[in-house]
Image (tube, grey):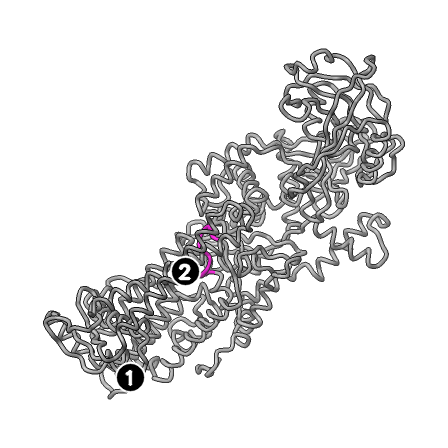
Amino acid sequence: MPHDLPKAYEPGTIEPRWADYWIQEKLFHVETPAPDSKQPVFTLTLPPPNITGRLHMGHMLNQTEMDIVVRWHRMRGFVTLWLPGTDHAGIATQMMVERALASEGKNRRDMTREAFIERVWCWKKHYGGAILDQMKRLGASVDWSREFFTMSDGLSHAVREGFVQLHEEGLIYRGKYIVNWCPRCITAVSDLEVIHEETQGKIYELRYPVVGSPNEFIVVATTRPETMLGDTAVAVNSADERYKQLHGKKVLLPLMNREIPIITDDILANPEFGTGAVKVTPSHDPNDFEAGLRNALPQIEVMNEIAQMTANAGPYAGLDRFEARQKVLEDLEKGGFLVGAKDYVVPLGKCDRCKTIIEPRLSTQWFVKIQPLADRAIEVVEKGEVKFVPENYAKTYFEWMRNIHDWCISRQLWWGHRIPAWYCKDCGEIIVARETPTKCTKCAGSKLEQDTDVLDTWFSSALWPFSTLGWPDQTPELKRFYPTSTLVTGFDIIFFWVARMMMMGLHFMEQVPFHDVYIHALVRDERGQKMSKSKGNVIDPLAVIDEYGADALRFTLAAMAAQGRDIKLSAQRVEGYRNFATKLWNAARFTEINGCARDPAFDPRQSKEVLNRWIAHETAKTASDVTAAIEAYKFNDAAGAVYRFVWNVYCDWYLELIKPVLSGPDGTAKSETRAAATWALEEILKLLHPFMPFVTEELWRVTGAHREPLLALSSWSQFDNVDAPDAEAEIGWVIDLITAIRSVRVEMNIPPATSLPLVLAGVSSEIAGRARRWAEFVKRLARVGEISFAEAAPRGAVQLVVRGDVAALPLKGVIDLAAERARLAKEIAKCDADIARVDAKLGNPNFAARAPEEVVEEEKEKREEAQLRKAKLADALQRLEGAE
C-alpha cells in the first residue's frame, strides 16, 4: 500500500478494501490458549440474527457497541474471541419459504416433510447469509472461522443432549394445556411471542336460562361469544348472595340446548366484576382451563387448528371464528338471549411474526419446568455475579423471572430441531433418546414414530454461550472461553433470550453464561418516533453507509448511545461525524506534508518544549477518560472525550499553535515538535480505532505502521508519569483567554475584522510573562491588537475572568453599549416567552395525557435549549453592564 494520503477522504474507497483485507488475512482468528496460559481472556457471543434478517439500525447499534468492546480488549492484550452466527428462526423462515412456494402455486402440505426441509436448506444457502455479509461491511471483527448456525450438526447435537438431560431430570414434560395458538402459523407460540394491542371491541352480555325455573336467567359477559358453544359450566362466587339459590342448579346453554352446571369457583368468579357470573370454556381460555381442572369439567373443543369451528360447534361447524361470532350473535338476538353489547377495550393478543390474532387453544405440548431453574437465575443477579447495565434492567428481569410460567417449547412446524421423542404404536410408550431407537423400551415393538413437532427456536438459542464452544463435549474452547465475558443486547429479548441463557448456563455448566449484560437503547428517527415501514421513517443503515461511510455511522451511534436513553438519529448527525473523519484526515495530511513522521520517536517523558509536554498531558488524560468510559459501557462519554480531544485540542489548538514552529528554522524544537505531532496522532488513531476502524487503519499506514504494522493488532494507549501540570497551566491559560475573547466577540456582534485592545488587570508577574510569551498567538487567534497591563480594568470595558485573572476588552467606541444591552434584554425576553409557552403545554393535563411520548420529549428539549441560551445571554448582559 502506498504511504501517501490522497487529498480527499473517500470512505467508499477505503472501507471495502480494509473489510476484505481483515477477512482474507483472518486477522481476527483466535487460537485457543493453552490451559496454563496467563493471558487474560475476553469472550463475547453475537446475538444470532435470524437467517431471514437484513441489517437494520438496531443491529447496527448492537454490533457497533460490541465491536468497540471487542477491539478495545484485543488492543489491551486479551485473547479476544467474538463468536458470530445465525439463528434458524423456525417460524419466520418457514413463513418465508411458504411464501416462495405460494408464488409458484405450491403449498407445504402438498409435499413431504423431507422435500420441504430440503427446500428450506436451499433457501438458506441463497439468502441466509445476507446479514453476515452486511456485518462484514461494518467491519465487525468477529472470528469468521468459527461461524455457527443453530441447525448445524454440532449445535443440533447439543440441542438434543440438552433436551434429553432435562427430560431425564424431570424438567421437561408433556401435557395437554391451554397455549397461545397462531391459526396462520398453525403452531403454539410462547407468551413472549404474543404482542398485546389495546383494541376497541365489544363485551356482550348473554342470558342463560336456569333449568327448572321458567323465566329465570343468569347473565354472563364475554368478548368472544363464539366460544360459548364450548361452555361446560357457569361459575359464581360462593359468597355472592345474588346467586346462592342457584348453587347446584343447571342452565341451558343457548343455541346448543345442552345443560351445564352452575358451579362455585371463588378464584374465577369475582362478584365485583361484571354480573359476577362467568361462563366457563375450559378448551378455549387459560383461566377457564384451570377452573375446569379444579371442578372436573369436560373439555369441549369448538375450534380447530386454523380457527374454524369444529363439529362440536353444531350448526356453526366449518365457519371461520369471526364469521361464527356474527352468526352466533344474530341467533342469540333472535332467541332473546342477547342482553346487549357495550364498547370495551380488549388487550388483543397477536402473533409477533404474522400479526394474526392469537387463539387460546387446548393442545398437547412439551414444556420446560421452570422451577428450580428460575430461582438460581434470580440468585446470581441478586448476588452480583451477573451485572445489568444500566442497573434498572435488573428490576425488569426480576419482575418477569418471579412471575414466570412453565415454558412451552414445542412448535407445530417442519423447520427446526425435531423433538427427540418417539411413540410406540403398539403400547403407546413415549421414548426420549439421544439416538434414534429401533425398538420400544417397554414392549420391544418396532413400530415407532417420531414426534412431528420441533423445538422453539429460543431453546437452541438458550444454549448458545456454551453449545458454540463445543458442549456437551469438554473441549479446550469450552474450558478457556466459558463463561463468556459480556452480553450486548436489546431490552426486548431480556426474557426471550437473556433469562433463558441464564437458566440453561447455570443448569448445564454450573456457571453463569456471562458476567455483564449491557442493554442498549432503541434507535428512533430524528423526532423520537419508533421506526416503522408504515410510517415511512425507516432509516436503512446500508444507504447511510453508502452516503457517509460506516465509520461515520458507527461513531454517530456511539456518540449518542447514552445509557437508558433512546437515540434520535438523523442524516445531519451522520454527516457531522463524516466531517469529523475528514477533519482527522486533513490533520494527518498536515503532519505528513510537514514531514512529522520522519523525525525520531517522541518520548513524552523527556519533552523539552511546553507545547509538546502539554499535548502529551492532554493525550494521557483523554486516554484515561476513554478507557474508563468504555469499561463502564458509557460509549457516548468515550466518543465525546475522543471527539473533543481530536477536534478541539489537537486540530484546533495544537496544530494551530505549532505552525510557526514547523515553518521556522530547523533545530531541536522543530524536530521534537514534528515527532510530538506524529506521536499524538498515533495515540488518537488508537483511541478512535474501536469506533472508526476503517479510517484509523488507513491513516496508520503513514504514521505508526513502521512500529506495529496493523492498528487493529496494536497496543492500547497506556501512560505513566506523563502528567505536565505546568504545561497545562500555561497553554490552558492561553487557550482559555483566546476562547473567552472569541465568545465576547460573538455575543456582542463585533465584526471579525475589528481588532480589539486587551488589558490584563492586576495580574502577577508570572501571568504577565506568560502573556508576553504568547502575545503573538493571542493577537493572531483572538484578533487582538495591543496587549497592555494595568492595575484595574478601564471604564467601558467588558471584564473576563480567565483562571482567576482579569482580562478586559475596552468596547467604548467599538460598539453601541446601550443598543447592545437592549438587544440582549430582548433576546432574554424571547427565551422567557419560549420557556413559558413550553411550560404551559407540559402543564396541560390533556397535552400530557394525549401527546405521543416523542412529542412530549421534543417539547422538553425545546425548554432545555431555551434555558441554555438564556443563561448565555444573561452572562453576556452581566458582562456588558459591568463595563459601565
Secondary-structure class at tag 2 = helix
Q: Nearer the viewer, residue 484 or 519?
A: 519
Is label 1 or label 2 in front?
2
The image position of residue 719, as x and y in percent, is 29, 63
User: Would residue 31 be seen by someone viewing this image from the given angle?
Assistant: no
- In reply to whether residue 651 is colored magenta, the answer given is no
Magenta part of the chain:
558-565
Asked if 497 appears above or below 591 in the picture, the reply is above
Check if residue 559 falls in the magenta segment: yes
Whether residues under marks 1 and 2 lie with C-beta atoms below 8 angstroms apart, the answer is no
The amino acid sitting under disc 1 is Leu
Q: Hey, which quadrant is residue 725 in on the image?
A: bottom left
Looking at the picture, tell me which residue is in the foreground, 699 or 210. Answer: 210
Quadrant the C terminus occupies: bottom left
Amino acid type, callout 2: Glu
SS majority, magenta: loop
Badge 1 crowding class, 10 Å Cα cut-off, few under 14, some 14 to 19, many 20 or more, is some
Q: Is residue 284 above or below residue 83?
A: above
Check the image and name the residue furthest to the bottom. Answer: 665
Q: Residues within 10 Å of mark 2 (few under 14, many from 20)?
A: some
